[in-house]
Amino acid sequence: MDKKVVMITGATGGLGSAMVKHFEKQDVKLALHTFQQDPFDVDCEHAWFKADLRDENQVKNLVSSVLANFGKVDVLINNAGISKNGMSWKLSSADFNEVIAVNLTAPFLLCHGLIPAMRSNNFGRIINISSVVAQTGVPGTAAYAASKAGILGLTKTIAKELASQPITCNALALGYFDQGMISEVSAEMQEQIISQIPKNKLGGVETVLAAIDWLLKDESDYVTGQSISLNGGLFT
Ligand SMILES: NC(=O)c1ccc[n+]([C@@H]2O[C@H](COP(=O)([O-])OP(=O)(O)OC[C@H]3O[C@@H](n4cnc5c(N)ncnc54)[C@H](OP(=O)(O)O)[C@@H]3O)[C@@H](O)[C@H]2O)c1
């Protein structure tokens, strides 16, 4: 049987690189996306693709390059994401649009470009990385929260559109994890965040990987359109 092709955007980031290390131990091919960081060695059949997800043409080229290289994508993990912070009345529309482009428009375009191949292969798993910030709202995160809330609506709609086929689309709404974006937050602010988390600690990437593994199982075919919260009890 053909090996599954797993595509991960933002594969050089904190969570993305942990996903790559996890999947390289499995019998899959990896289509890995990076923006600015240098690709790293991966111990299985893989290819790196560079694209600025703010640019629609680059996203379209990314889709065609991945399909030209692998012929299909079975699993799409829309993981790349950015945040530009500022109170709504101070945030520039340029910053707002940039966040929407990377966090929402690019995942849409990737789904748009890759779903036809999933439909003809009669298999697909789409996992969109969202955030607890979309569920609760956090001052200063208007663009990020809007983009990550948009992803939840996109997820539910795509799930229903594809429900008659063995293709699922789900979102992981992450709380605060000990890798990636958290490094941009001061130690003082991290302490404040942790004090609000019922589990009283940041999440570990193993929780994200376990959720992804579960969504990829054949038995999880019945799980679609969901926003699965991994947040230490922060939002229930
Ligand atoms: N870590 C957390 O606690 C947490 C919590 C909730 C949600 N999330 C979500 O989880 C996902 C991964 O986050 P992370 O924490 O691993 O963040 P990260 O380490 O900052 O990684 C972000 C990734 O996005 C890529 N990226 C940034 N700008 C881009 C652009 N213009 N075009 C294409 N790619 C671009 C980065 O590429 P370069 O490195 O090459 O610039 C990087 O690979 C994001 O969607 C984030 O919103 C994370």
Image: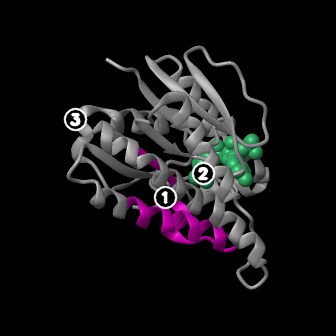
Crowd tier of the residue under label 2, counting other residues whose Cα lies within 10 Å: few below 14, some 14–19, many 20 or above: some
Q: Amino acid at mark 2?
A: Lys
- Provide the secondary structure element on which disc 1 rests: loop
Q: Nearer the viewer, residue 137 or 168?
A: 168
Q: What residue sits right under mark 1 in the picture?
A: 234
Q: Residue furthest top?
A: 43
Q: In this rendering, would 19 be left or right of 141?
A: left
Q: Amino acid at mark 3?
A: Glu
Counting from the top left corner in percent of width and height, residue 84 is at 74, 64
Magenta residues, as a range?
126-155
Q: Is residue 177 magenta?
A: no
Q: Nearer the viewer, mark 3 or mark 1?
A: 3
Q: Nearer the viewer, mark 1 or mark 2?
A: 2
Counting from the top left corner in percent of width and height, residue 163 is at 24, 54
The answer for how far apart the CA atoms under marks 3 and 1 are is: 28 Å
Task: Report the label total.
Answer: 3
Residue 60: mark in rendering: 2
The answer for how far apart the CA atoms under marks 2 and 3 are is: 32 Å
* Quarter of the rendering occupied by the C terminus: bottom left
Q: In this rendering, would 142 be left or right of 22?
A: right
Counting from the top left corner in percent of width and height, residue 45 is at 55, 17
Visible in this render: residue 227?
yes
Q: Amino acid at mark 1?
A: Leu
Residue 68, above or below 180: above
